[in-house]
Structure formats: structure tokens, C-alpha cells
Image (cartoon, rainbow, N blue to C red):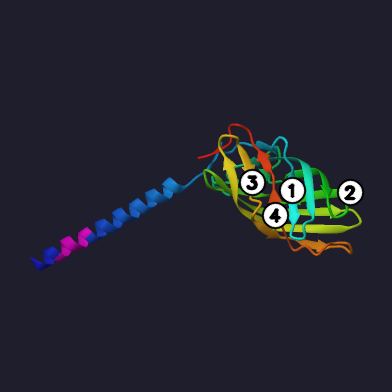
Amino acid sequence: MRAGRHKIAAVAMIAAFSLGGAAAAQAATAQAVQWNPQNTVEPITLASGTQLVMTANTGTEVRCDVVNGNVQAPVAGNPAVAGTVDSSGAPAAPTITRCTNSLAPSAATTVTPSGQWLATATSTGSVEISQASATVTISGVCTITVDNAAVPANGWDNGTHQLTANSNASFPIGESGLLCDGATSATLSGALQLPAEVTIS
């Protein structure tokens, strides 16, 4: 009888752990989010009437009027991750043009993004930007480098299909040039527009 009771107890414990594991797996699956549609190249631009603004911790601003590019999910098989791509779906940086700066307003300002930027959906209303790299050249004045910056908790709206930068999150920057202002970090503000079919679910 004792052996039988021990076996029954053991079976009950195994069943309990199995059910617990299944419930945890279902919960994890329920919490997973993804970009829609998948395997489709989608264009990105600046939202109408907005600018992309990088503000250094010294107060210097770089403002840009035009952002163009494409994004596609999944990246590395992860449906929650979208990456910047060219029109054929190959990894590529976006383009950022028509920029000005407040450090030396009369100097030409060029922003050159590089690598594939990633946008990871963490919920239906939040996206983490990562691998964001770019060089900002203020002609004859200063060169600002952004290397694999990460910006968490950017806002996403399934109604407007806009990604709004989290202007409270700072990332490190580097500077080189005799007339630089010693900035070491920056924040980003602005909103990107995606087509109506792009959502997070």
C-alpha cells in the first residue's frame, strides 16, 4: 500500500509540473508579439509635419527634414524584429537628408547612417530601436559619431502606424574636431510613418 501511495504521489507531482510547464509555455506564447505583415518590404518616411531631431547633452541640435528607407520582418527568423532594408529586402541603412545644426548654423550638415537598424516590438505599443549607427558631419566644424545606439520604449500606434522616438532615452555619442562642444550623449525625437497595413499584434 505504501509503495502504491508513493507511486500515486509521484505521478501527481509529475502531472502538476507538466501542467505548470504547459501553462507557462502558453503564457509566454500569449505574450509574444510580431510585426505584420511578414516577409514584405515596407517603406518608411518621416511623419508629415515632423522632423527627426538629435539633441546632444550640451544642447546642440541636428534637425533633419527627410527620412527614407524600407523595413522588413522577420530578422534572423524573429517575427518581432524588423530591420531596415533596401527595395530588394537586403539589409541596408535608411537615408537621412536635408539636415541643419545649431552648433554652426551656416555650416553644411550631412548625416550618413550605416548598417542595418533594428526595431524590436516588445508589446503592441512599444518598440526598441537598436544597432542605430550614423556619422553626422558638420563641415569644417565637428564630426559626431553614433555607434550601435539603442533606444528603448519608443511608442507605436496601430491606428496611425507611426513610430515615435522616446526623447527621454539617451545614448552615447563621440565627437572629433577642433570646434566640437564636448557632447557625450544625445536623445532622439521625431516620428516615422509606415503604411496602413503595418501593425504589431
Residue displayed at 56% across by 34% down: 159
The stretch of residues the image draws in magenta is 6-12
Find the distance from the CA under tag 2 to the CA under tag 3.
29 Å
Label located before the other in sequence (4 or 1): 1
**Residue placed under numbered mark 1 in the picture:** 53
Kindly report the secondary structure that dominates the magenta region of the rendered protein.
helix
Looking at numbered disc 4 in the image, what kind of residue is underneath it?
Thr
Find the distance from the CA under tag 1 to the CA under tag 2.
16 Å
**Residue placed under numbered mark 2 in the picture:** 108
Q: Secondary structure at mark 3?
A: strand
Q: How many marks?
A: 4
For disc 1, the neighbor class at 10 Å (few under 14, some 14 to 19, many from 20) is: many
**Disc 2 vs disc 3: which is toward the camera?**
2
Residue found farthest to the top:
196
Residue 89 visible in the picture = no
Residue displayed at 63% across by 33% down: 195
Left/right placement of residue 182 relative to residue 46 reads right
Label located before the other in sequence (1 or 2): 1
Q: Secondary structure at mark 2?
A: loop
Label located before the other in sequence (3 or 1): 1
Left/right placement of residue 24 relative to residue 32 reads left
Q: Nearer the viewer, residue 189 or 73?
A: 189
Residue displayed at 65% across by 47% down: 165
Left/right placement of residue 147 relative to residue 33 reads right
Find the distance from the CA under tag 4 to the CA under tag 1.
8 Å
Q: Are marks 4 and 2 in contact (CB under 8 Å)?
A: no
Find the distance from the CA under tag 3 to the CA under tag 1.
21 Å
Looking at numbered disc 1 in the image, what kind of residue is underneath it?
Val
Q: Position of residue 147 (x, y in %)?
A: 72, 58
Looking at numbered disc 2 in the image, what kind of residue is underneath it?
Ala
**Residue placed under numbered mark 4 in the picture:** 187
